[in-house]
Image (cartoon, rainbow, N blue to C red):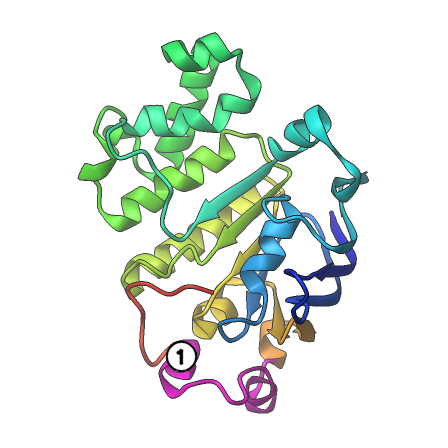
């Protein structure tokens, strides 16, 4: 379980981006975080894995307080937090197998990583996971030869290779066409069940959030103002979450338009 208490993030002397957030994400569940650009969605995810340092508050994963860790203990904890990125974050000149194996870097001696001498058990596991998501036949193909959906599947497998206790997905469908977006969201939902993983997804498209998540968290100006099942997200709740949002972004949230690229 992920447990967040009174989380605050402030940059410099400005207004806090996160303002005392409390949130719990149990195992085997998909939680979608929605809200307008600037609501703090991406900052929330990055505070969890400490890519961004929280200003105050507590983040706990399966009984381990992540916000109290430093050095080697923090690096060990990060191995158990799988991250899926909007821009895929693959090394284009490397093969799919090599990109997938980067999910094991936190577990390998430095010489093995440099020499790309991956243990046989890691290679077997990679093939199992790639087969599970339908990309095993691309194992020796360069990452830059793949479509967007295929690249995102590589990112998903890389995260699973970490043996994660949670998956964080930062706009995983924003660079994809609508059909591929739905396939990736369905894949994340199935993997949550299959591996008993909590999955926390920052997403712009509310239609996808309602269709593929167990719970929706709505953020506005660094605060959580909605937290309930998808069926409870009615027009009044949407109006509160997206009040004052530009028309084009609101259209994306409503599922009227689909972005090629969006940032949170």
**View extreme (left): residue:** 145
* Crowd band around label 1 with a 10 angstrom C-alpha radius: few (<14), some (14–19), many (20+): many
> At 33% from the left edge and 25% from the top edge, which residue is drawn?
97
Q: Quadrant of residue 174?
A: bottom left
**View extreme (front): residue:** 13
Magenta stretch: helix, strand or loop mostly: helix
Q: Quadrant of residue 116?
A: top left
> At 59% from the left edge and 66% from the top edge, which residue is drawn?
40
- Judge by depth and name the residue closer to the eye, 177 or 240: 240
Residue 211: percent from left, percent from top: 48, 68
Residue 12: percent from left, percent from top: 65, 61
Residue 67: percent from left, percent from top: 76, 44
Q: Is residue 245 above or below residue 11?
A: below
Q: Which residue is mark 1?
A: 249
Q: Work out whether residue 5 can be spotted.
A: yes
Looking at the image, residue 74 sits to the left or right of residue 42; the answer is right
> At 49% from the left edge and 55% from the top edge, which residue is drawn?
170
Q: Work out whether residue 28 can be spotted.
A: no
Q: Is residue 198 magenta?
A: no
Q: Is residue 237 magenta?
A: yes
Q: Quadrant of residue 45?
A: bottom right
Residue 35: percent from left, percent from top: 54, 74
Looking at the image, residue 246 sits to the left or right of residue 135; the answer is right
Q: Secondary structure at mark 1?
A: helix
> At 36% from the left edge and 42% from the top edge, which residue is drawn?
153
Q: How many marks?
A: 1
- Magenta span of residues: 233-253
């Amino acid at each position: 379980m992920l447990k967040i208490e009174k989380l605050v993030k402030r940059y410099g002397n400005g207004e806090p981006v996160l303002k005392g957030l409390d949130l719990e994400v149990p195992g085997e569940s998909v939680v979608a975080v929605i809200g307008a650009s600037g609501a703090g969605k991406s900052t929330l995810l990055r505070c969890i894995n400490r890519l961004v340092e929280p200003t105050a508050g507590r983040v706990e994963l399966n009984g381990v307080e992540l916000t109290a860790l430093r050095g080697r203990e923090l690096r060990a904890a990060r191995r158990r937090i799988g991250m899926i990125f909007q821009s895929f974050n693959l090394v284009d000149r490397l093969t799919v197998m090599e990109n997938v194996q980067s999910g094991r870097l936190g577990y390998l001696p430095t010489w093995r990583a440099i020499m790309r001498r991956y243990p046989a058990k890691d290679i077997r596991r990679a093939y199992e996971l790639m087969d599970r998501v339908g990309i095993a036949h691309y194992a020796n193909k360069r990452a830059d030869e793949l479509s967007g959906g295929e690249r995102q599947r590589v990112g998903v497998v890389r995260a699973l290779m970490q043996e994660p206790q949670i998956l964080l997905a930062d706009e995983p469908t924003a660079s994809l066409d609508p059909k591929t977006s739905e396939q990736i969201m369905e894949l994340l939902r199935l993997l949550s069940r299959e591996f008993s993983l909590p999955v926390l997804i920052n997403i712009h498209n509310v239609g996808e959030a309602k269709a593929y998540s167990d719970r929706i968290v709505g953020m506005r100006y660094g605060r959580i103002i909605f937290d309930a099942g998808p069926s409870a997200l009615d027009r009044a709740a949407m109006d509160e979450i997206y009040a004052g949002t530009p028309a084009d972004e609101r259209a994306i949230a409503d599922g009227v338009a689909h972005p090629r690229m969006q940032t949170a």
